[in-house]
Amino acid sequence: MSVSSFHPAVPGTDPSPPVAPVTQGLVAVAMSGGVDSSVAALLLKRQGYNVVGLTMKLWSPPIKQGESCDDEKTCCTVDSAMDAKRVCDQLGIPHYTLDMQDDFEERVIRPFHEAYLHGETPNPCVNCNSFVKWDALWQRARAIGADYIATGHYAATVREPGEAADAAGHTYILRADPLKDQSYFLWGIPASSLARTLFPLASLSKPEVRALALEAGLRTAAKGESQDICFVPGGDYREVVAARAEAEGVEIPEGRFVGPDGEDLGSHRGVPFYTIGQRKGLGIATGEPLFVRKIDVATGEVILGRKEDLATRAFVADRFNGFGPGWRPGTARECLVQFRYRSPAVPALVERDAEGDASRVRVTLSEPGLGIAPGQSAVFYDGNRLLGGARIRETLP
């Protein structure tokens, strides 16, 4: 097992000698205009790579008259692109801004909107990584001759040799700094792209990244960190869903709240405005704390339950993507499953369909999980090593 020079060993892996960079290789760095991607480019340049910065123009925020744009939430794509360009100028590397709004609309924003209309809880960052960064952007990077793609994600990669002497081997993603680890959002990257993917921040914490940027005099060293989805700068997805539905002439019908014992608890705004596990903001008064347990799109009912009603031991997921051997159809595999970002990974059995839809898996947890929501990601680990993931479709009794 070998780990690249800026992908240090993670506990549980073999700390093999680093591999020297291929200086003639061209690395395309996805640069958002933030400090993480800025330092990623800085480190690659210091490693001796030929580096080019690529900034994706993904979305143009509607700014109402009299309002200003809060760049700390990355809604000002022009300002962010200018920050990325100025960092590239400081580093002495080329920079290009790519108009990828159509890709982002088709692969991230519209699926986000439609998921809520269907009572699901989407994960747009997974779609952005899977279908925009490691698909549309990677295609453009290769078109200009790039050998590698790099980002400022807090993750690492490791390559394991194949079983036979002539086997190609397999590349895996590894967890990084526990406080910033972003491997959960990377499960959808095509396995074929991992060998050409670099994560320069693998061994670093956020304070260390800022210190490197400050030491190098990068203009993004003190730039704030976005806490919101880039196209939901206010933080309330409901406003975005409602505004888009109105603009497209899509009616969102009201429905009924149904209590844990089947009682009618009154009307609600519409199924897109509620998520599995939600307690606050229901707008109803009951004598006990109730949570959204199920959303029935066909009837428009939002079914509430007590906390213990949220427990689930098994679910079905689709859009499976796996890394390495051991994922043949019809096989079952014990691993750790993380079904929410920041939630602990728990032991589970993952079974792939033997026939039919090869993208579907059944996941059985060793202990009940609370608030597992269709649309979210189930991500599979072996210790710190990412084995793959899938999109949750439905929970099972």
Image (cartoon, rainbow, N blue to C red):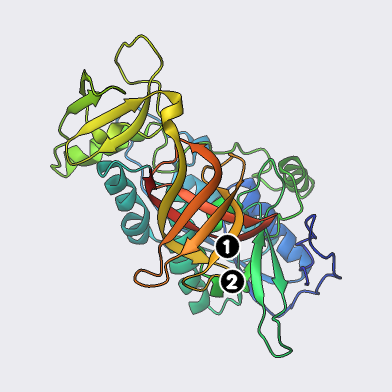
Query: Residue 341: x and y, percent?
Result: 55, 42
Residue 326: image tag: 2
375 vs 331, left or right, is left
Question: Looking at the figure, which quarter contains the N terminus?
Answer: bottom right
Q: Earlier in the sequence, mark 1 or mark 2?
A: 2
Q: Residues within 10 Å of mark 2 (few under 14, many from 20)?
A: few
Q: Residue at x 59, y 39 (%)?
A: 342
Q: Quadrant of residue 76?
A: top left
Q: Is residue 321 above or below residue 76?
A: below
Residue holding disc 1? 333
CB under 8 Å between discs 1 and 2: yes
Q: Quadrant of residue 374?
A: top left
What's under tag 2, amino acid-wise? Answer: Gly
335 vs 47, left or right, is left
What's under tag 1, amino acid-wise? Answer: Arg
Instruction: Find numbered disc 1 in the image and state the secondary structure of the residue it sits on.
Output: strand
Q: Residue at x 30, y 16 (%)?
A: 283
Residue 309: image tag: none
Q: Is residue 189 above or below residue 395?
A: below
**Depth check, front residue: 249 or 333:** 333
Is residue 323 in view? yes
Instruction: Find numbered disc 2 in the image and state the secondary structure of the residue it sits on.
Output: loop
Marks counted in the figure total 2
114 vs 3, left or right, is left
Question: Looking at the figure, which quarter contains the C terminus?
Answer: top left
